[in-house]
Image (cartoon, rainbow, N blue to C red):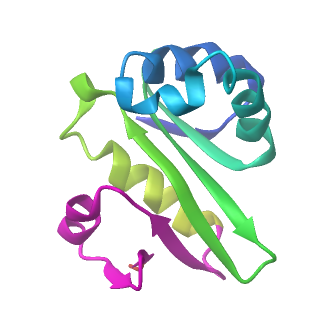
Amino acid sequence: MDIIRYKREHENDLLAAIKLDPNWHIFTNDVAADKYRKRLQESITYVCYEGKTFSGYLRALLDDDFAIYISELFVVPEMSNRKIGRTLISKLRSDFSYLTVYALSDEDAYYEKLGYTKVGSVFEVHQ
């Protein structure tokens, strides 16, 4: 499993994967797709590959060097239960260990399963 910083060369793999999930149409519809491509580059974005197969990604937003917020965490459904999400989060935590990491979530059960603490409407990600 390789976790690397997102580059434009990963764009087609990432967008093709999330287009298959109707819950992600907010980023892939005709109106939003160009804006989202730009946001992927401007944000802190990691992609995961297993061999040459795109497996998932994480996009995070830096808040003036006080905290970092996981905005999106996506794992290709066929690749679930391989600790891809956990590994993407660990990479973010490692690279930004000096910041508090929060997850903006509509998947509370996932973050609870990982043992993270819910703080208001976000989860604090800790080791």
* 9 and 40: which is toward the camera: 40
Q: Residue at x 64, y 45 (%)?
A: 45
In the rendered image, residue 122 lying in the magenta stretch gets the answer yes
Residue 43 among magenta residues: no
Looking at the picture, how far across and down is residue 120, in whole percent? 41, 85
Q: Quadrant of residue 90?
A: bottom left
Q: Which residues are magenta?
A: 96-124
Q: Is residue 106 left or right of residue 113?
A: right
Q: Quadrant of the C terminus?
A: bottom left
| Image x and y of residue 124, in percent | 43, 80
Instruction: Say how many tags the image has.
Output: 0
**Residue at point 65% right, 15% down?**
30
Q: Residue furthest front?
A: 31
**Residue 12 point in image, percent of width and height:** 62, 13
Question: What residue is drawn where x is 63% and y is 64%?
Answer: 95
Q: Nearer the viewer, residue 95 or 25?
A: 25
Horizontal relation, residue 42 to residue 102: left or right: right
Quadrant where the image shows the N terminus? top left
Placement of 108 over or under 9, stated as above or below: below
